[in-house]
Image (cartoon, grey):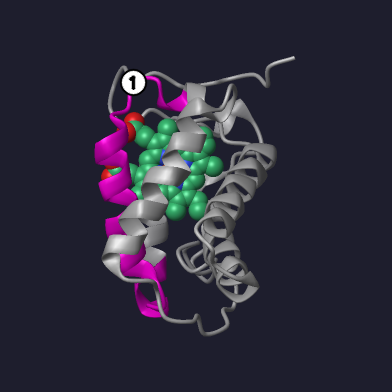
Amino acid sequence: MISERSPMPLDDMTPEAPLPPLPPEEELSALAKTFYDKVYAHPWIGRFFRHVDQARQEVKLVRFLLLSWGDASFGSYQGQYLREEHANLYITDELFDLRQALFAETLREHGHGGALVGAFLAFNERWRSFVVKRSVQECEPTYPGEEIVVVPRPA
Ligand code: HEM
């Protein structure tokens, strides 16, 4: 229960270090393509995207990066947006870590060094608490009848 005194959980972002400049949009699009190629081809995380158009997903990720990178004041709004967009997906810490690993692999394949890899991983970490659920019961449809997506880890 939220008491009158406790703040709404809108600002549960971790304290953040300043980020280096974001690569230009053209490079972000290339990164998003490689990243989602890996995600969509993956036997576990890829199954979450079975009904999601990859090209549109790439554009959305690039837009998200351009809006949110280094803009701490916008963070809680973006966090709420991500919470809603992922509300029906049973995302565990393990799936989040897997996404991080695929992201790091993508950056290295594009020739980016440790500083930028670290910055992206830290940036992504800011959103963990908005998308990860501790149980399936935490998942919610965002509109009536929306499917709750649960994908067990393949054996
Ligand atoms: C740093 C973490 C993450 C970020 C920044 C992120 C970002 C995004 C964005 C911007 C969208 C588009 C939302 C829209 O339609 O407007 C999206 C959708 C989606 N994300 Fe994530 N995401 C993250 C983590 C994850 C993880 C760990 C999964 C694991 C399954 C995931 C699965 C999905 C799926 C399946 C969609 C498509 C939802 C739909 O269109 O029905 N995301 N994400």
**Which residue is rendered at x = 26% and y = 48% of the image?**
59
* Count of number-bearing discs: 1
On the image, the x and y values in percent for residue 134 come to 66, 38
* SS assignment at label 1: loop
On the image, the x and y values in percent for residue 131 come to 51, 46
Residue 65 counted in the magenta span: yes
As drawn, is 26 to the left or to the right of 103?
left
From the image, give the main secondary structure of the stretch colored magenta. helix
**Which residue is rendered at x = 30% and y = 67% of the image?**
66
Question: Residue 10 lies in what quarter of the image?
Answer: bottom left
As drawn, is 108 to the left or to the right of 110?
right
On the image, the x and y values in percent for residue 145 come to 31, 17
Q: Callout 1: 10 Å neighbours few (<14), some, many (20+)?
A: few
**Which residue is rendered at x = 40% and y = 20% of the image?**
50
Residue 111 counted in the magenta span: no
Q: Residues in magenta?
A: 48-75
Residue that extends furthest to the bottom in the rendered view of this protein: 18
Work out whether residue 69 or residue 76 is closer to the camera in this orientation and state it: 69
Question: Residue 140 lies in what quarter of the image?
Answer: top left
Would you place residue 9 above or below residue 42 in this image?
below
Ligand 1 is found in the corner quadrant, namely top left
- The residue identified by callout 1 is 51
- Is residue 2 visible in this depiction of the protein? no
On the image, the x and y values in percent for residue 6 come to 54, 68
Say which amino acid is labelled 1.
His
Work out whether residue 138 or residue 118 is closer to the camera in this orientation and state it: 118
**Which residue is rendered at x = 55% and y = 54% of the image?**
109
- Name the quadrant of the C terminus: top right
Work out whether residue 23 or residue 121 is closer to the camera in this orientation and state it: 23
- Disc 1 residue: CB within 8 Å of ligand 1: yes
Question: Residue 136 lies in what quarter of the image?
Answer: top right
